[in-house]
Amino acid sequence: MKRFCLHKYVQVLFHISLGILVCQCSLNSNSMQKSLKSDADQIKVIDTHEHQHWPEEFGDVHMGFYHVIYTGYLMHDLVSAGSSWMDIEILDSLCMDAKWELFGKSLNYCRAGSYYGHFIKGFQKLYDFDDLYFTPSNIPALSRQIEKNYSDYRSWFDTAFHKAGFELMFLDQYWRPFNTDLDPRYFALVFHINPLVMQISQRPAAGEEPPSLYDQAKAAGFVIKSLDDYLKFCEHLFEKNIAAKTVCVKNSLAYSRTLYFEDVPYAEANRLFQKDSNHLSQQEAKKLQDFMFHWIIQKSIHNDLPIQIHTGYLAGNGNTLENGKPVRLNNLFLKYHDVKFVLFHGGYPWTGEYAALGKMFPNVYLDLVWLPQISRQEAVQTLEEILDGVPYNKLFWGGDCSLIEESTGSLEFGKDIVSEVLSRRISRGLLTEDVAIDILQRIFRENAIEVFKLEEKLGRKFKVE
């Protein structure tokens, strides 16, 4: 009996000791995470992907809380939860109670999600918003603050940009891809090449409304009658972007088509270009597009421009997810060794493919952009996998947002996630704190300066952190 009691006593003592040890490890990890987050907050961030715009560019002249939701990713989750898409004109005519009546139920269903989480993080950082959730009682005051800030958005953007900790944002202006005019105090130009690829197979017939690229060509004095004419104008666009200090090329073609780009000979592309675009089969149109992207890769090599590529999940509420499988790009990585390919978004949900490509190819880099907003947990797991397999001088971070509140929330989310992963690895004896700090600086700043050659291309010095 005494032996039995002693055995039970030892068991209890063991479990108590184990619990204390686990709690202590957890406390140490949490303390380290806070310390690393503090270190991350000192970094002047080089954000490698944004879609920031001035509100008037999208016709937004009055901005409140629900307008900011409408412009951001959270709106997509509201629709997924069952809400109808917001009609801005109707929205402007409604009082706050009526707006909550329309969207509050769906907004509440999104409270556990990463779109919601990163969105609220931006307001916590910039507006000193203390609540965990948006509610009918806290939205009106928050909306009044937004209206006040947006009455002079440029001034507000400057304040928020620096409060959030940004030094530079790469700007992809997909809504006006031929524009090269931006504010260099905040932005570096990204050359968005989707129209060059897609519109090669959309040559207008006589009397048809021309796609935007053909309009741009005409305005610049170019007449496009042959494939060579088309390429000559695209060469002009490259020169225009280089003169404007573009730092990279951006391909988000997965929203429109597959990421598999066949190597099509010039003679075949030339023959297909001469056909009436309305009579091209889907396969023939794809061949022209494939030819064009290979041409763009070759021009990017010549101009020393990395190529950013959207992989994985597609924003919105309906598309062909399979288009974005990262492994579809494998043939390009095998053929073009002299260009830096930067893959976006963790390739979610194909995060293993994404990490494997970054490990396998010296010229394939990985940008964590937008992955934390899609799924915070997936970002944690994917970063763990990446750090196991991929040298950390190949990693970047971007926000992928349209307004400064959301970009700020994205940055806060990103820093939280990277700090969490690094603190766990320290607690497991896989990293030292000094290496973890180096990884932070690399992901959020130093890698972008080096890989994109920002000092050389932008003609400015970036202080070493």
Image (cartoon, rainbow, N blue to C red):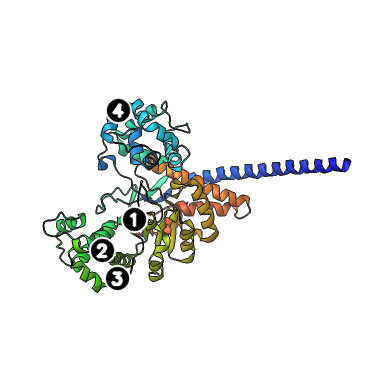
Instruction: Give, as a three-letter code, the residue at label 1.
Output: Ser
| SS type, badge 4 | loop
Q: Is residue 272 above or below residue 138?
A: below
Q: Would you name the residue on which mark 2 appears?
A: 285
Instruction: Give, as a three-letter code, the residue at label 3.
Output: Val
Q: Quadrant of residue 235?
A: bottom left
Q: Can residue 42 be seen in this view?
A: no
| SS type, badge 3 | loop
Q: Residues within 10 Å of mark 3 (few under 14, many from 20)?
A: some
Alpha carbon distance from label 3 to label 4: 54 Å
N-terminal-most mark, 2 or 3? 3
Q: Residue drawn 11% across and 59% down?
A: 206
Q: Which mark is residue 94?
A: 4
Alpha carbon distance from label 1 to label 4: 36 Å
| SS type, badge 2 | helix
Q: Residue drawn 27% across and 38% down?
A: 60
**Place of residue 10 in the rendered image (x, y in percent of width and height, measured from the top left):** 80, 43
Which one is closest to the eye, mark 1 or mark 3? 3
Alpha carbon distance from label 2 to label 3: 12 Å
Q: Which mark is residue 264?
A: 3
Q: Would you name the residue on which mark 1 appears?
A: 252
Q: How crowded is mark 1: few (under 14 residues within 10 Å), some or many (20 or more)?
A: some
Q: Nearer the viewer, residue 39 or 297?
A: 297
Alpha carbon distance from label 2 to label 1: 18 Å
Which one is closest to the eye, mark 2 or mark 4? 2
Q: Which of 30 and 90 is in front in this view?
A: 90
**Place of residue 58 in the rendered image (x, y in percent of width and height, measured from the top left):** 26, 42
